[in-house]
Image (spheres, rainbow, N blue to C red):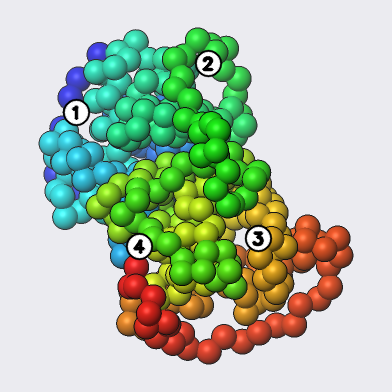
Amino acid sequence: MSPVRLVPALALALIACPQVIEEPGTEPAEEQPLSATQLFDGAAEQWAVPADLLAAIAWHESSFAPGDHEHTESRPAVGWMGLSPERVALAVQLSGIEIERIEDRTPNIYAGASVLDALRDELAPNAPEATVTAAWWPVVVAWADQEEEWLAHDFAADVFRTLQLGLDATTEGGESVSIRARRFQDLDSVAFSFAPYETGEERFGPGYPLASRRLLAHWSNFDSRANGIGDIERVVLHTTEGSYAGAVSWFRDSSSDVSSHYVIRKSDGEITRMVDDDDRAWHACRNNTDTVGIEHEGASSNPSTWTPAMLDASARLTAWLVNEYSIPIDRQHIVGHGEIQPSNCSGRSDPGAHFPWDDYMVAVTTYATGSAPVTPEITFTEPTGGDDTDPVH
């Protein structure tokens, strides 16, 4: 069992301060901030937890980006480690980090390490300090902090999948982060809670038949379309600005006041269907009546969000939608959230400047028609106020 490690103010200040690199006979070099890898390594050493596990959790919680606190389409989470409000309170108690600083990258990673250490002490005291083994499984499940047990296990499985396959990604600022691939010998022994699957007629609400599951958002977070699927004219692409599990759970939370028709996971392209297509999800303020919303796990500010698996799954889904509902394959009918968000709602920029629109439209066209004609470029004007009959969600 590792001891509680309070971080003195001076030590934390040294952690957060940039390094000064000097060589004999030269002028002092410019100050260089610690890299993401150095921060994961330093926090791991301080709190005796595996650095790769910290990095994998951060990748799935935030996509190595600070998060958009104005973004309502994933559960509330803070910083790179995606700390929930409860986890923030625990981290402040464990680490001594001031709550005002915990959003910043360095304190946030160290705070996350302190929480991981405390969960290990409670749930898996024999889990090794420097190596990830299956003994860490219950710790990662607990880290997920999900009310629905299967979502916590789903998050843990995604983290362990990344640890198995390895990762080469960049941060929002362009730094490289690598996680080496490894083989786990004992994962088949962990207790796993599977996602619920609907049976019988409940499975057959209108929607994409290749989705992994139909798991409806809370009934208070969507409503019906006046003309059902006859209202559908456009597809809107989003980013969750948080984790896949965080978006799914948030749409199922009665207090969130938000939903989307589909959520796609970046690691493997898994799709959860959360609102039937004939209903109106609340995803695009005043643009909900005629649209189908697709959430993509990740951060719009980081190009590494757009994994081939997620892009391919999304293009196939959109291709099915355009064929099923006779939607034109052009950039007036397949749009980004930020391109249509009206000025009288909170500003959005997703899916962001890094989204590969040209390649995406070619893929959608190919999957929908079997050929890939060039789609003319469209310049979008300033978003309007939207449909006044559409509720502000």
Q: Is residue 247 visible?
A: yes
User: Which tag, 4 or 2, sits closer to the chain's start?
Assistant: 4
Query: The C terminus is located in which quarter?
Result: bottom left
Amino acid type of disc 2? Leu
Mark 3, residue position:
321
The residue lying furthest to the right in this view is 371
User: Which tag, 4 or 3, sits closer to the chain's start?
Assistant: 4
Mark 2, residue position:
187
Q: Residue at x 47, y 53 (%)?
A: 275
Q: Judge the density around disc 1: few (<14), some (14-19), many (≥20) Cα neighbours within 10 Å.
A: some
Q: Distance between the Cα atoms at labels 4 and 2?
A: 35 Å
User: Which tag, 2 or 1, sits closer to the chain's start?
Assistant: 1
Q: Which mark is residue 71?
A: 4
Amino acid type of disc 4? His
Mark 1, residue position:
5
Image quarter of residue 357:
bottom right
* 108, above or below 157, in the image: below
Q: Distance between the Cα atoms at labels 4 and 3?
A: 26 Å
Q: Secondary structure at mark 4?
A: loop
Q: Residue at x 32, y 82 (%)?
A: 344
Q: Please identify, in this view, whether the residue under mark 4 or under mark 3 is nearer the observer.
A: 3
Place of residue 98 in the rendered image (x, y in percent of width and height, measured from the top left)? 14, 48
